[in-house]
Amino acid sequence: MNCRNFLKTTNVLLIGALLLYCTGCGGYGGGGTGGGGAAPSAPTGLVATPGNATVSLTWTASTGATGYYIKRSTTSGAETQIAAQAGTSYNDTTVTNGTKYFYVVAAYNSYGTSADSAEVSATPTAPAAVNVTITVDPTKTRAISPYIYGTNFYEGNTNAPALLTLDRAGWKSLDGVQLDQQWLERG
């Protein structure tokens, strides 16, 4: 055997041995039986809870999982990955109020990735505005500052109207007349 044939034969044997080793351990081609493992099962119990510009996700851990891929879309069935993490909860703060979002989660480990969980959806919303009306009856109060009842006593305004009301529209007197800031400052 000459040197040229020896190198070809040696290379073929080395490649064949490497393929045989990798196939036998399950790490190449998936056909081996020794030392192999399995990808985790799909996560279950996925729940999406909407909030103000946020959606909180929680799910049940998958046996054998080392992490989870969180996927989202605004179209059902078209989710793409937005995060990867080890825990079983995620707070999505990159959402817009009033938009419906769809979510799935997949588990992974060194052997592969599970199927996606069942799909859930949530629509984040801003909290409802709270209506508050404050009515001040000067006959039942005591002065606590120079700006009592919205009037400026430092500038000599001592004639605050009875039952002055403050609501979203601003200040009003008992008869419902809208009062402007200049009246409140000068009386």
Image (tube, grey):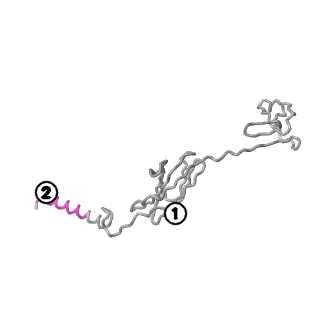
Residue 3 lies in the magenta stretch = yes
Mark 2 or 1: the one toward you: 1
Amino acid, disc 1: Thr
Q: Which comes before the other along the chain, label 2 or label 1? A: 2
Q: Is residue 37 above or below residue 68?
A: below
Q: Is residue 48 rendered magenta in the image?
A: no
Q: In the rendered image, which residue does mark 2 sit on?
A: 4
**Image quarter in which the N terminus is found:** bottom left
Place of residue 115 in the rendered image (x, y in percent of width and height, measured from the top left): 42, 59
Horizontal side of residue 147 vs 70, given as left or right: right
Tag shown at residue 60: 1
Indicate the position of residue 151 as horizontal and vertical percent values. 82, 35
In the displayed orientation, state which residue is furthest to the right.
139
Point out the image quarter for the C terminus. top right
Question: Given the image, on which type of amino acid does mark 2 rest?
Answer: Arg
Q: Give the residue at x 78% y 33%.
A: 179
C-alpha distance separating marks 2 and 1: 61 Å
SS label for mark 1: strand
**Range of residues picked out in magenta:** 2-17
